[in-house]
Image (spheres, grey):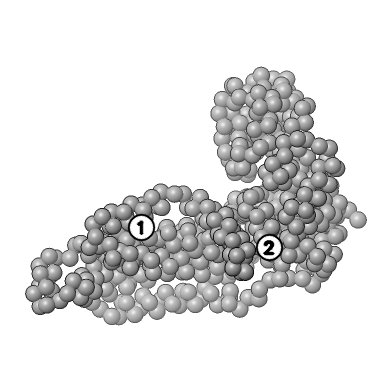
Amino acid sequence: MFADPAFADAWSRLPDYLGQHVIVSLTALALGLAVSLPLSLYAVRRPHLRTVLLAAASIVQTIPGLALLALFYPLLLGIASLTAEYLGFDFSALGFLPSVLALALYSMLPVIRNTITGIDGVDPALLRAAQGVGMTDRQSLFMVELPLAMPVIMAGIRTAAVWVIGTATLATPIGQTSLGNYIFSGLQTQNWVFVLFGCAAAAMLALAVDLLLSLIERGAATRQRAPVIAGVAGIALVVALALAPSLEARKSGYVIGAKTFSEQYILAALIGQRLQANGLSASPREGLGSSIIFDALAAGEIDVYVDYTGTIWANVMKRDDIMPRKETLAEVARWLKQERGIAFAGALGFENAYALAMKRGEAERLGITSLADLARHAPQMTIAGDYEFFGRPEWAAIRETYGLDFKARRAMQAEFMYPAAGNEVDVISAYTSDGRIAQYDLVVLDDPQGVIPPYDAMLLVSPKRADDAVLLAALKPLANAIDVETMREANLRASSGEAPEQVARWLANRLRK
């Protein structure tokens, strides 16, 4: 098993991923306890406040974990901008801080609920006895009720710990390294060893922590010190073992961003290999959403990544007019430098545009070659797109221009969307540099009205690195070095199970000189 390349690759990443996962989970749980326990003790004698507190914590719990994590990033980014402008300092809004705050909120409900329930469950006769010996209400709470309620409170802490460890796997899209990196990258590259490895590692960590906390709970229930000491020592040992490799690791100089699809993983690995070849250290921040990764670059949270002219044109510049490909590239580069201070380090040489595609045989049977032809059949068809597509301006423009009114729409992971074409769905939103178009015998439908803007892949460098001559020199050989056919083959290799780093090495040997 250890000889399997995919497993060996997963195992080699474990120290970093596990260490970061433990750090963010432990910090979030500690912050959650530091807030929820005092609030619970303050509210337990105040019925109205208790109702409000439980309701607020319950509402937070209904928010999907990924949404809660993502919402904190723009909030903290705005606060960081204000502190930089008015107080002269800023802080990182990517990764660790939004993850900790969101996970801390997630941890609060079981702790608050169990603390209040445990104290309410104390035998009234014991309370009367405490009053009878002259204890104040405060003394009764801390010397009688709280110790008796501790087993119930510990049960809530166990639940909170398991929730936090599990939900922390969702922190990857906002830039926090965790065991979720296995899952997100595995799904994008169809590396099921990574997916299973990440799930198993997160489950084992949660079970280990829950078991150790159960010892503390048992010791609190039986008034025995030995289980409590064993549980605390065990947790300390787990934390120490997880953090040791991270504490020894050296911080990387450059941060390379990547979005949530295989092409981005390949290109991020290619950039990293280029920097290493020039004696520069670098680390990846993978699985970031389009808006998050652009804001992170503008704020200096990451140093370099690959974006596409059409994405910047429609989503960031809010342009809905269409210009020729070269003019679009020049205008985007000018706008980025002038408005955001972002440096354009060159186009890679290929275009990865959105397009609608369907099975070749079905398209030929129905006589569909363009989006205009598709409009006649759309009411009887189902379309699938990636998680971003139906919220993007391009989709709105396509729908309005061609009058597309599909029977149903489905959002899918790209890895499942291509094989679904012609089976579960009729039409998909494909990427023109994706090798799976040929693999699954799909045909890309023409856009006669020119609604979809150009999507040239381009290297972008953050404002703080815009004048970094060493970095720019290391990136220069990538400019205009990759044609679309080569990129399609690279993407197909990744979709077939090759690791992005391996595909990047293959791609590096085929760069145009």
- Real-space Cα separation, disc 1 to disc 2, in angstroms: 35 Å
Q: Residue at x 68, y 32 (%)?
A: 397
Q: How many residues crowd around disc 1 within 10 Å: few (fewer than 14), some, or many (20 or more)?
A: many
Q: Is residue 206 left or right of residue 284?
A: left
> Quadrant where the N terminus lies?
bottom right
Q: Is residue 299 left or right of residue 20?
A: right
- The residue carrying mark 2 is 300
Of the residues shown, which amino acid type is indicated by label 1? Answer: Leu
Picture quadrant where residue 41 is located = bottom left
Residue placed most toward the observer, 231 or 251: 251
Q: Position of residue 315 (x, y in %)?
A: 67, 43
- The residue carrying mark 1 is 109
Q: Secondary structure at mark 1?
A: helix
Residue found at the far right of this picture:
513
Q: Secondary structure at mark 2?
A: loop
Q: Residue at x 59, y 68 (%)?
A: 87
Residue 255, placed above or below residue 321: below
Of the residues shown, which amino acid type is indicated by label 2? Answer: Gly
> Quadrant where the C terminus lies?
bottom right
Residue placed most toward the observer, 119 or 156: 119
Residue 501 seen: no
Residue placed most toward the observer, 481 or 52: 52
